[in-house]
Image (cartoon, helix red, strand yellow):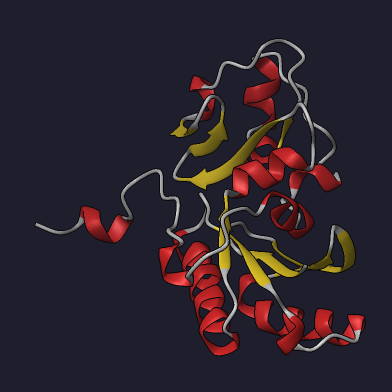
Amino acid sequence: MLILAFDTATDVATSALVSDGEVLGERRSRAVTVLEDIDALLRQAGAHTRELEGIAVGIGPGSFTGVRIGLATARGLALALGVPVAGVSTLDALAAGALGALPVVDARRGEVFVLEDEPRVLAPAELRPSPGTLCVGSGAVRYRSVLEAAGAEIPADQDERHVPRARFHAQLARDFGPAEAVEPMYLRVPDADKTRK
């Protein structure tokens, strides 16, 4: 199965083209260039859009705008190409890239998204990792001092494990179906909703 996978929920967007578990290509950039990245991946692999059999998209949690860019791109491509879509949690993909690690994504506003028993949003100081727990992700890098003071271990800032990689989105993708059935994972109310009266 030829799967196009991408995630734009974090500051670093990732995309990959995967055929039957083999990674044909993978790119990192920004959410605004995800379509350019997809085109480059297809060209690099000598593949055409009509060969795609599924799209795996990151559903967050992460930046509201980034998540919406990813979902809109997946829905547009799925509609144009007639392929099914599967949503994959950004936290799950991050965890798959660093087995045994606790994924911690910067949620901004002094909070982090984490995957403990379930996805949650909380202040970094509220996170209580067991001593020696490896924490990965943009939140682990940003709140390194807080997490290390709590006993966690954080890899170097440039470590590959801090970025969710689209190859893991493709690996974790299940239940491909209509694009409109894929919902974003928001763990808090958007700022715009807080201003409504």
Q: Position of residue 37 (x, y in %)?
A: 75, 79
The residue that appears at 42% across and 59% down in the rendered structure is 183
User: Closer to the camera, 16 or 158?
Assistant: 16
The x, y position of residue 172, in whole percent, is 69, 49
Report which quarter residue 24 is drawn in.
bottom right
User: Is 73 left, or right, of 143 in this rendering?
Assistant: left
Number of marks drawn: 0
At 79% from the left and 43% from the top, the residue drawn is 97
Quadrant of the rendering where the N terminus is positioned? bottom right
Seen at 51% across and 45% down, the residue is 107
Tell me, yes or no, if residue 40 can be seen here.
Answer: yes
- On the question of residue 158 being in view, the answer is no
Is 8 drawn above or below residue 90 in the view shown?
A: below
35 left or right of 118 in image: right
Identify the residue at image location x=88%, y=63%. 23
Q: Quadrant of the C terminus?
A: bottom left
User: Which residue, as the protein is rendered here, is positioned at the far top?
Assistant: 131
Left or right of 80, for residue 168: right
